[in-house]
Image: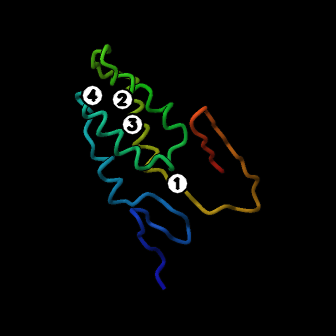
Amino acid sequence: MRKEVTYLGHVISDKGVPPNPEKIKAVIEYPVPKNAKQIKQFLGLIGYYKNFIEDLSKIAKPLTSLLKKEVPFIWGHDQQIAFSKFKEILTSQPILQYPDFKQNFILTCDASQYAVGCVLS
């Protein structure tokens, strides 16, 4: 019997569903963006792991602010913190795990006119 299996880019085991280490490597090795196109590419990589990152849009705000046409591209302290935070989150374990029914659950919901999202933690 196999202890883990890779399915649709995710490693599934009896311990939970962490991101695939091979795919995380691309995020970890991504260089500091030098222009808006590179920020879009990095956010595309991060978007693949959106289910693993709580408050993704809040963390990404300093990066997405540089994507506005009227804003000059100046990589600053806030952008570096956001960039590093994404890498830190994706290398922390555990990411997704099976529920412990001895613990209380927290249901966090967010809704707008167009969408709804929930996280059970």
- Indicate which label's residue lies in the foreground, 4 or 3: 4
Residue corresponding to mark 4 = 36
Q: Which mark is residue 80?
A: 2
Pinpoint residue 66: horizontal percent, then vertical percent: 34, 22
For mark 2, give the secondary structure: helix
Specify whether 61 is left or right of 34: right
Three-letter code for the amino acid on which mark 1 is drawn: Ile
Q: Residue at coordinates 63% horizontally, 36% vertically from top-left?
A: 111
- Indicate which label's residue lies in the foreground, 2 or 4: 4
Q: Residue at coordinates 62% horizontally, 63% vertically from top-left?
A: 98
Q: Quadrant of residue 23?
A: bottom left
Q: Quadrant of residue 87?
A: top left
Specify whether 14 is left or right of 99: left
For mark 4, give the secondary structure: helix
Check the image and report above or below for 31 versus 1.
above
Check the image and report above or below for 66 versus 82.
above
Q: Residues within 10 Å of mark 3 (few under 14, many from 20)?
A: few
Q: Are marks 3 and 2 in contact (CB under 8 Å)?
A: yes
Q: Residue furthest left?
A: 34
Which comes sooner in the sequence, label 2 or label 4? 4
Pinpoint residue 119: horizontal percent, then vertical percent: 62, 47
Q: Which mark is residue 84?
A: 3
For mark 3, give the secondary structure: helix
Mark 4–mark 3 distance (CA, rounded to whole Å): 17 Å
- Indicate which label's residue lies in the foreground, 4 or 1: 4
Pinpoint residue 36: horizontal percent, then vertical percent: 27, 28
